Amino acid sequence: MKELISMMFLLSCFLSKAQNNVGGATTNIVCRYQVQFLKDTLNVESKTNEIMALQIGGNISLYKSEQKRKTDSLRHESIKNSMQNAQDKKSVVIDFSKISKVNLVHEVYKNGDDLVIFDNIIKDQYFYPANKKIDWKINVETKQIAGYTCQKATGQYNNRFYTAWFTKEIPISEGPYTFKGLPGLILEVYDTNKYFFISLISIQRLNEEIIPMNRAIKTTYNDFKKKRREVNDNPIAELQKLSNNPISKEVKDKVIENRKRKNNYLD
């Protein structure tokens, strides 16, 4: 992988300018990471994974599920086609059956020093400023990852301690999720129990638009956590708001069980 990222390539990335307005920024490079995580910290069989993309352009970046990028595009196309086909009909039928499920819906948008997290609770989308920056402690320990010499750093984010491996060979102060602020690109990061393990797959020079989630509700991290906890404690009440019909006991039991099994959040 290292051979694909030459020093001339990196220089061209730094010299390229990205616009600072939302919706107008474009990437210089795109990093793809594999995220392995447990949906349920009490069940090792609940391990799953998601490919995430980190779009970087100048002082702007967006971290988002690769599948969600495709899903959003397919969803938009499906709605567009359904509306066109409904000209002679009284109702619109939108087919989302071919759209794959996304395991990690959160997005992290960075613009200069501002870091914003987008996330969902059931059908509602929210955004809030990142709770705090990580106070990294850089260690002298090094190791090789994908041909790059990486240095170890440790830090705490909310209630978890993380180990990150970054490389000064790619001097971009970027990384997946909110793991940023080191003197080099973070190639690998994980928490003490490895409930989340994030590792670099590829780095590609790519020019594409950076578009963060829109139509989200502004909130704070504490209010977001409170709302999520309320929904997890009583998911049926939230589900009932979305349905005009009575909900069967079978469906209720399934919803409650699914919410209990999803208890591992990166924030």
Image (cartoon, rainbow, N blue to C red):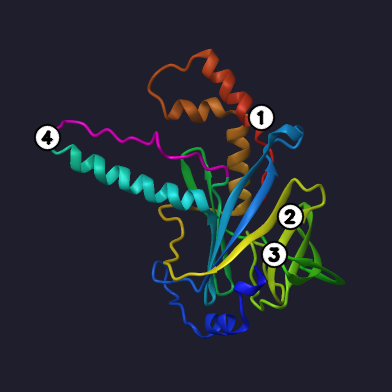
**Mark 4 or 3, which is nearer the eye?**
3
Q: Nearer the viewer, residue 30 or 250?
A: 30
Secondary structure at badge 3 equals: strand
Q: Is residue 223 magenta?
A: no
Q: Circle 2: is it few (<14), some (14-19), or many (20+) Cα within 10 Å?
A: few
**Amino acid at pointer 4:** Asp
Secondary structure at badge 2 equals: loop
**Mark 2 or 3, which is nearer the eye?**
3
Where residue 34 sits in the image (x, y, percent)? 64, 53
Q: Earlier in the sequence, mark 2 or mark 3?
A: 2
**Which residue is disc 2 drawn over?**
158
Q: Which residues are magenta?
A: 89-103
Where residue 216 sits in the image (x, y, percent)? 45, 52
Residue 117 visible in the snapshot? no
**Amino acid at pointer 2:** Asn
Find out whether the residues at labels 1 and 3 contact each other: C-beta distance under 8 Å: no
**Which residue is disc 4 drawn over?**
88
Compute the Cα span from label 1 to label 3.
32 Å
Question: From this viewpoint, which residue is outermost toward the front?
Answer: 3
**Mark 1 or 2, which is nearer the eye?**
1
Q: Earlier in the sequence, mark 4 or mark 2?
A: 4
**Amino acid at pointer 3:** Leu
Secondary structure at badge 4 equals: loop
